[in-house]
């Protein structure tokens, strides 16, 4: 196991799987460039060589080597480097998941950053619940490794030579995912505007008033954009933390109403105080 610096990876760390020995293949047929890249001399000297497989793995303390997918398909979302194989391994362990592939999808014009998409092939219908799959990943991995979208397929698309055809994978359709809570439409102008903001930022809809922002694919960067829109639309000064404390449209609407009331009281006080001071100045001798 080799890390990005070319040194041996510590136990339990993710690294590239390499093969070292005297009897390796001489290289790729008529591909001297690829041979130079993948077959290198042992830096410790001697007649052994090292072959870089391009596969990612993790060596456990008990000697087991876990394969985590191809290094070529290492993903990067919102500045985080993601090992897709770790997510895929968790999803494959879930009931009724036959095959899976995790990839990124380019952001739409309205979304903030790239989306992490999980493509799922089930053994049978009905398909696994999206909320259960999200929870399985969220319980084991950091929030930035939880897929934003889950797309269910009858099979993964393949090229003529049997490899996965990533170019043929469908893009997210932007519809509301299968959540544990039922969809409830907005019941007031505030809830309606907040739902529209969430739908615009997350590129998903329709947004129900009881849908959790993070179950819809929200993250900290998207949260900052939502709060920015709330500040503009309602003329309130709210910290980003507000969305973490009130992660549904219904809860956020309550926060908006409370702060609007405080804002109104403050404006009235600012208007009334100068009048009071003026009247007091006009009657200095009043007792």
Image (tube, grey):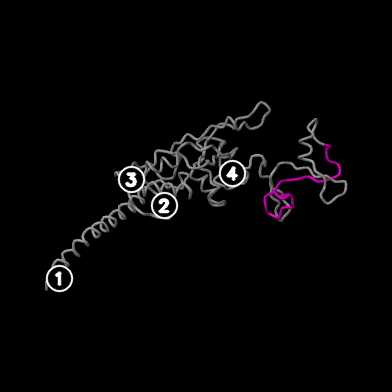
Q: Quadrant of residue 183?
A: top left
Secondary structure, mark 4, is strand
Sooner in the amino-acid sequence: mark 3 or mark 1: 3
Characterize the magenta stretch by its predominant secondary structure. Answer: loop
Which residue position is annotated with label 1?
A: 284
158 and 52: which one is in front?
A: 52
What separation in Å lies between label 3 and label 2 (alpha carbons)?
14 Å
Q: How far separated are the C-alphas under marks 3 and 4? A: 34 Å
Q: Residue 65 carries which label?
A: none
> Would you name the residue on which mark 4 appears?
76
Instruction: Find numbered disc 3 in the image and state the secondary structure of the residue it sits on.
Output: helix
Q: Mark 3 points at which residue?
A: 191
Give how far apart the Cα atoms at labels 1 and 4 are. Answer: 71 Å
Q: Give the range drawn in magenta.
A: 1-26
Per the image, the residue denoted by label 2 is 243
Query: Viewer-nearest of labels 1 and 2?
Result: 1
Q: Position of residue 99 (x, y in %)?
A: 60, 37
Distance from disc 1 to disc 2, alpha carbons, whole Å, reads 50 Å
CB under 8 Å between discs 1 and 4: no
Q: How dense is the environment of label 2, judged by Cα within 10 Å: few (below 14), some, or many (20 and up)? A: many
């Amino acid at each position: 196991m080799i890390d990005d610096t070319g040194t041996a990876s510590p136990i339990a760390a993710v690294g590239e799987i390499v093969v070292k020995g005297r009897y390796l293949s001489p290289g790729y047929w008529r591909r001297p460039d690829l041979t130079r890249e993948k077959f290198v001399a042992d830096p410790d000297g001697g007649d052994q060589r090292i072959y870089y497989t391009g596969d990612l793995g993790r060596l456990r303390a008990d000697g087991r080597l876990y394969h985590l997918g191809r290094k070529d398909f290492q993903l990067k979302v919102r500045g985080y480097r993601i090992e897709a194989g770790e997510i895929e391994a968790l999803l494959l362990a879930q009931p009724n998941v036959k095959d899976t592939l995790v990839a990124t999808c380019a952001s739409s014009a309205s979304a903030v950053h790239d989306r992490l998409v999980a493509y799922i092939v089930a053994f049978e219908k009905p398909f696994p619940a999206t909320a259960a799959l999200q929870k399985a990943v969220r319980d084991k991995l950091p929030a930035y490794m939880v897929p934003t979208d889950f797309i269910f397929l009858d099979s993964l698309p393949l090229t003529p030579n049997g490899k996965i055809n990533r170019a043929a994978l469908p893009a997210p359709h932007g519809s509301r995912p299968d959540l544990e809570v039922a969809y409830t439409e907005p019941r007031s102008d505030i809830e309606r505007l907040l739902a529209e903001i969430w739908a615009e930022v997350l590129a998903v809809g329709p947004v129900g008033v009881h849908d959790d922002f993070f179950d819809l694919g929200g993250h900290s960067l998207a949260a900052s954009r939502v709060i920015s829109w709330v500040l503009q639309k309602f003329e309130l000064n709210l910290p980003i933390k507000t969305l973490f404390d009130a992660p549904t449209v219904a809860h956020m609407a309550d926060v908006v109403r409370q702060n609007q009331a405080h804002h109104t009281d403050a404006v009235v006080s600012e208007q009334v105080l100068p009048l009071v001071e003026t009247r007091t100045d006009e009657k200095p001798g009043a007792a």
